[in-house]
Image (cartoon, helix red, strand yellow):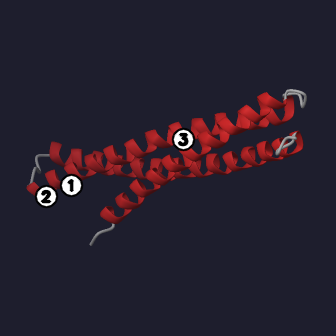
Amino acid sequence: MEIIDIQKINILLNDMWNFQLILFGLAVTLFTVIYSFIISKRDELRSIADTIKNGEQTAMIKQKETFAKNYIIRLKKINNNLIILILTTFLFSFCSWFAERFISEYNFELKKYILLTLATSTIILLTLIAKQSYKIFLHYKESTKV
């Protein structure tokens, strides 16, 4: 006798699909916010570049330029990871949705395999999300230091 039946697998696949959509929305939101910070800092960097072109090349201006460049580089790395997260969660949610709705209930082993693969992948993904969140938190702490 099976511990888990096809109905439970379909429910779990549906839950997995919903959970992946939540992660997708969170990743898109973070990407958008960080992207706006990058654009804002890029505009500031352009202003600094114009100041340097006008001959005003003080140590303070160079320090601002270096800080702005490093800030943009760090945020771009975070956003690159978020793009991977967005694509991955979209793929996982699609797989969950597809498996629940279009794979025949007579193909119990395939559905079970997909569920276990997605569950394991989601745990790995949550670990990566936690790591990325920690990086964002560290960046926040560093950039708001007075």
* C-alpha span from label 3 to label 1: 31 Å
Crowd band around label 2 with a 10 angstrom C-alpha radius: few (<14), some (14–19), many (20+)? few
Q: Residue at x 83, y 47 (%)?
A: 11
Contact (Cβ within 8 Å) of mark 2 with mark 1: yes
Crowd band around label 3 with a 10 angstrom C-alpha radius: few (<14), some (14–19), many (20+)? many
x and y, in percent, of residue 62 in the image: 14, 51
Label ID, residue 64? 1
Q: Residue at x 55, y 44 (%)?
A: 125
Q: Earlier in the sequence, mark 3 or mark 1?
A: 1
Q: Is residue 55 found left or right of 31 in the rendered image?
A: left
State the residue in front, 6 or 139: 6
Residue on which disc 3 sits: 85
Q: Is residue 80 found left or right of 139 in the rendered image?
A: right
User: From the viewer's perspective, is residue 27 above or below residue 90?
Assistant: below
Q: Is residue 35 found left or right of 42 in the rendered image?
A: right
Task: Determine the residue located farthest toward the front in the rendered image.
Answer: 1
